[in-house]
Image (spheres, helix red, strand yellow):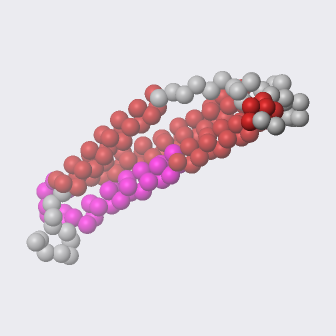
Amino acid sequence: MTQTSQATDIQGDRKGDAPLDPNLAPPHRPASRTRDHLANERTYLAWMRTAIALIGFGVLIARLRYLVSPDVPGTGQGWLVGLGLSSIGLITVLLSTWHYFAVLDAIENNTYKPNSRWVILFSLVVTLLGAGVLYVLFSAPATVKGFPAM
């Protein structure tokens, strides 16, 4: 058998293949649909890790005020940034759960269309909160309870 006839045999006849589910759209075969669901779940878990990190950083920043001496002026606003980070973390949990089920439904109905609006909004909010964190960290005095100033 020549190389051309081998290629025709490999690509040509599909009689031996299992029939595809007629309810599925042509580009979506069961294996592809499974991959889509697994990717959706991985994305959800990544958002949940992000939410946990935001909540953790919020608690950390809110608690930093107890390390700074109360005699030092300008140390009372860090809790606002911590509260903001923790709040954004909780909102992330709610939105990511809602998004997971919306994408799950779209995959099942074969109507999924990507949307970048939430990604842009979340990126802007985290950027603003990150700037707040940097402001709090760099504006906080170096005097810490129990340690002399260097």
Can residue 125 be seen in this snapshot?
yes
The residue lying at 50 percent from left, 52 percent from top is: 49
The residue lying at 47 percent from left, 49 percent from top is: 50
Residue 118: x and y in percent read: 46, 31
Q: Quadrant of the N terminus?
A: top right
The stretch drawn in magenta includes residue 60: yes
Can residue 20 be seen in this snapshot?
no
The residue lying at 51 percent from left, 27 percent from top is: 115
Q: Is residue 144 left or right of residue 39?
A: left
Residue 3: x and y in percent read: 74, 36
Of 131 and 20, which appears nearest the observer? 20
Q: Residue furthest front?
A: 2
Looking at the rendering, which quadrant does residue 106 occupy?
Answer: top right
Q: Is residue 6 left or right of residue 50?
A: right
The magenta stretch spans which residues?
A: 47-76
Q: Main secondary structure of the magenta part?
A: helix
- Tell me: residue 63, above or below residue 29: below
Q: Quadrant of the C terminus?
A: bottom left
Q: Is residue 2 left or right of residue 86?
A: right
The stretch drawn in magenta includes residue 34: no
